[in-house]
Image (spheres, rainbow, N blue to C red):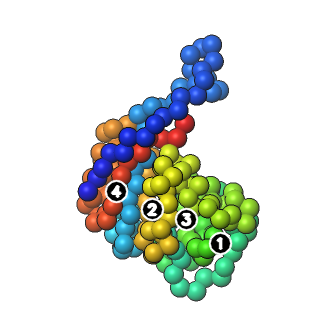
């Protein structure tokens, strides 16, 4: 079931022009829609349909535990921001999502991540503890919910987060997640 989470938005100080930092006004309508899947096939279909529906691959994050035998790599050894692809089966699951990388996070183990969350995790030197929770909170997800998503990934679930520009895009994204058997879905105000 899709739920709307009302999170507090901090508005950055504006300059004399009335615009946000660097002259760009923040999009106060933007949301992050998050879904938790228990099945890779359903997660793959949802990610594909999000792209087909017009969501940019750069706005779709996905994170899950790596299954099988892939050589471990530390976060400092990845190139998440360059779109490194690891393994054909991984490409099939996450095909087309930007920044696919394999990361090793202490306490969690090997993860596959794509999109903005992969870049955030890859930027962590040594995959610092709490990195996954911090990466979720960087998407505008409150800490208590980020901890729940961290626990879901640890338990073997797949978490997809997509940036929606407005309420209409938020509703489209939530419908797509629902159509593909999402176990849990929520929406959060974007971090400013």
- Labels 3 & 1 near each other (Cβ < 8 A): no
Figure quadrant of residue 105 = bottom right
Left or right of residue 111: residue 123: right
* Residues at marks 3 and 4, CA–CA distance in whole angstroms: 19 Å
Q: Furthest residue to the top?
A: 16
Question: Does residue 51 show up?
Answer: no
Circle 1 residue: 106
- Labels 4 & 2 near each other (Cβ < 8 A): no
| Mark toward the start of the polypeptide (1 vs 2) | 1
| Mark toward the start of the polypeptide (2 vs 3) | 3
111 above or below 15? Answer: below
Figure quadrant of residue 14 = top right
Say which element carries label 4: strand
Picture residue at 66% right of the left edge, 61% below the top: 122
Say which element carries label 3: strand
Circle 2 residue: 148
| Mark toward the start of the polypeptide (4 vs 2) | 2
- Labels 1 & 2 near each other (Cβ < 8 A): no
Residue 72 in picture, x, y percent from top left:
66, 79
Q: Nearer the viewer, mark 3 or mark 4?
A: 4
Q: Nearer the viewer, mark 4 or mark 2?
A: 2
User: Quick one: quadrant of the N terminus?
Assistant: bottom left
Disc 1: CA contacts within 10 A as few (<14), some (14-19) or many (>=20): some
- Labels 4 & 1 near each other (Cβ < 8 A): no
């Amino acid at each position: 079931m899709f739920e709307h989470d009302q999170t507090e938005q901090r508005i950055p100080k504006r300059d004399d022009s009335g615009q946000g930092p660097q002259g760009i006004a923040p999009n106060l309508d933007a949301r992050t829609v998050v879904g938790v899947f228990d099945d890779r096939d359903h997660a793959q279909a949802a990610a594909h349909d999000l792209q087909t529906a017009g969501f940019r691959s750069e706005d779709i994050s996905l994170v899950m535990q790596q299954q099988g035998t892939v050589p471990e790599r530390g976060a400092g050894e990845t190139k998440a921001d360059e779109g490194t692809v690891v393994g054909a089966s991984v490409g099939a699951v996450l095909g087309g999502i930007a920044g696919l990388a394999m990361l090793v996070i202490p306490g969690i183990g090997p993860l596959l991540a794509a999109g903005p969350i992969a870049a955030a995790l890859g930027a962590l030197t040594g995959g610092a503890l709490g990195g996954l929770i911090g990466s979720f909170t960087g998407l505008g997800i409150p800490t208590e919910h980020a901890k729940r998503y961290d626990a879901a990934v640890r338990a073997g679930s797949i978490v997809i987060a997509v940036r929606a520009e407005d309420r209409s895009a938020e509703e489209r994204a939530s419908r797509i997640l629902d159509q593909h058997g999402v176990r849990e879905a929520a929406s959060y105000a974007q971090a400013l």
